[in-house]
Amino acid sequence: MTKLETKKTIPIVAKSFDELHHGYIIEGERQVASEGVIDFLQNKLNFDTKGNPDFYLSNFETLSIEESRRLKELQGKRAFTGKTKVFVVMVDFITSEAQNSLLKIFEEPTEGTHFFLIIGNASRLLPTLRSRLHFIKLSSMGEDKEAKDFLCKSQASRLAYIKELTDRISDGELPKNRVIELLDSLEKIFYDKLSKGDLDSAYKIESIIKARSYAEDRSPSLKMLLENLAIDF
């Protein structure tokens, strides 16, 4: 399987928290993005992320309204060690109700609180939420290459790849969002082909969108979803 880049510089120009925006959306692979944010906080802003009660790192497959309310409650409290609190929130999907709850945080942000919302595909966010946050898109060359390699494989090789991928997810070695990232990259490839006149790509895009909607359910059969695509393509 394609080995993802493990460290990436986050393109934020700030020498202090006073110069930092109150909230960022970072579109990219969660591990790469989160490590980049932590590196930025520690090395650029001298903010200790280890054992710091004012640093919150959360990881959700689906962010619900209850979890969003909990974040709202936490960010409203005073910092323990100084004036600054930082939240790094990694998600695959956020319900509409949870997004509206988050929106209230960013409409009236608590002084000294900064959010980094990491998501694989920011187009799933409500426009009103996106408009309140500074958007950063990280390159996805590794993910795109993985999708291109997938399409170049024979049907038998695709099925073998899918088995390996879903087995690693089941074993906890990889997060479930790797399937969403693969689908996002496949969708981009076929949209590019469609823009160049390949009308067959429209059907494939429709199939990908449908598969992704099922993949975002609570208990999807990821292996079955990908196998159906492998056969269709």
Image: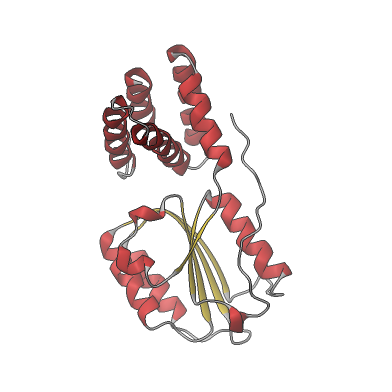
In the displayed structure image, the side of residue 171 where residue 65 appears, left or right: left
Question: Relative to the observer, which residue lies in front, 198 or 155?
Answer: 198
Residue 125 image point, x, y percent: 34, 59
Q: Is residue 150 above or below residue 67?
A: above
Residue 194 image point, x, y percent: 34, 33
Whether residue 96 is visible, yes or no, is yes
Q: Residue lying farthest front?
A: 196
Q: How many marks?
A: 0
Residue drawn at point x = 46 percent, y = 30 percent: 166
Quadrant location of residue 141?
A: top right
Residue drawn at point x = 62 percent, y = 61 percent: 10
Question: Relative to the observer, which residue lies in front, 92 or 78?
Answer: 92
Quadrant location of residue 39?
A: bottom right
In the displayed structure image, the side of residue 30 where residue 133 appears, left or right: left
Residue 218 image point, x, y percent: 31, 45
Whether residue 163 is visible, yes or no, is no
Q: Is residue 5 above or below residue 37?
A: above
Q: Is residue 131 above or below residue 90?
A: below
Q: Work out which quarter of the rendered image holds the C terminus and state it.
A: top left
Residue drawn at point x = 46 percent, y = 19 percent: 158
